[in-house]
Amino acid sequence: MIDYYKTLGVEKTATQDDIKKAYRKLARKYHPDMNPNDKTAEQKFKEINEANEVLSNPENRAKYDKYGEHWKYGEEYEKAQQQQRSQGGFGGFEGFGGGNYSEGDYSDFFRDMFGGRTSGFGRGYGSASGKFKGQDIFADMSLPLREVATAQQRTFTVNGKNIRITVPAGVYEGLQIKLKGHGYEGYNGGPNGDLYITFHIEPDAQFERNGNDLKTTVNIDLYTAMLGGEVQIDTLSGKVKMKVAPETQNGTTVRLKGKGFPVYKQEGSFGDLFVTYQVQLPKNLTEQQKALFEQLKNS
């Protein structure tokens, strides 16, 4: 039996937050992008996603705790069991195909019941009504902050198939999209599962994102801060010049409207860029420069 708790390295008493943290840590470790051409890592990544699909959903988790790895079919079994009882059939597991099934026999029982063969019922639930949707796949995609400022084309492999998607500009941390039908194959002719992609945005050395706004720090020298002048600012769309007002204090923040991050799925809409001035004190002063500062001090 597959132990999803063991797959994620958590206890059965783990909280949903514990499961989320464990999944993200393992998903990044075994992600195909981090382990190119590593079949072992690829298989591990699939197992991690399968475990997370179940345990991250409280309803699915409850079914798994009750039915084990065949949690998707547990309710179908109970319905079939109730129908057999109403028709004078077996009670519990006893009487099924002349056997006496225990909890440890779930795997064989469900394979016979839903695996495309006629089961011991004599009613053929596996072939007549055993079509089930395939499991969903949950994947993470990490992208640098600057890249998601514009639409990006990405190609990745799922179940041996290459999938090409367009990542819209402005995606944000934790955003999840669904690609219908790109999950695991369905059972007995049932529909495929879906692929869910969660985006993670890598930090940038220069810009800090806050919603659709950006923050950055720019160094200016003491003379420009005191007398005013111009400073060149880096933005996501290129460099711009800004006027610095005389007597600008250290830590002063100014706003560049519309120079922030693009708003997700709102073409032409942008946040703002907030620039904080960091005044740099001069070093290695000459004697003449020191004398001038003394004059200012005593004036």
Image (spheres, grey):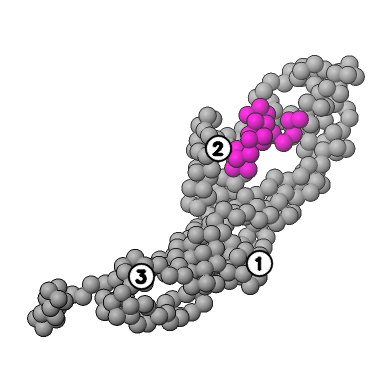
Separation (CA) of disc 1 from disc 3: 31 Å
- Residue closest to the eye, 62 or 49: 62
- Seen in the picture, residue 270 relative to 292 is either above or below; the reply is above
Q: In the figure, is residue 187 to the left or right of 1?
A: right
Which quarter of the image is occupied by the N terminus?
top right
Range of the magenta residues? 52-75
The total of numbered circles placed on residues is 3
Residue drawn 12% across the image and 74% down it: 298
> Label 3 amino acid?
Tyr
Please state the horizontal and vertical placement of residue 20, each as a whole percent of the image. Answer: 53, 43
Q: Residues within 10 Å of mark 2 (few under 14, many from 20)?
A: few
Q: Secondary structure at mark 1?
A: loop
> Closer to the N terminus: mark 1 or mark 2?
2
Q: Secondary structure at mark 2?
A: helix
Residue 140, picture quadrant: bottom right
Residue identified by numbered label 2 = 16
Q: Residues within 10 Å of mark 1 (few under 14, many from 20)?
A: few
Residue identified by numbered label 3 = 277
Residue identified by numbered label 1 = 266
Does residue 56 belong to the magenta stretch? Answer: yes
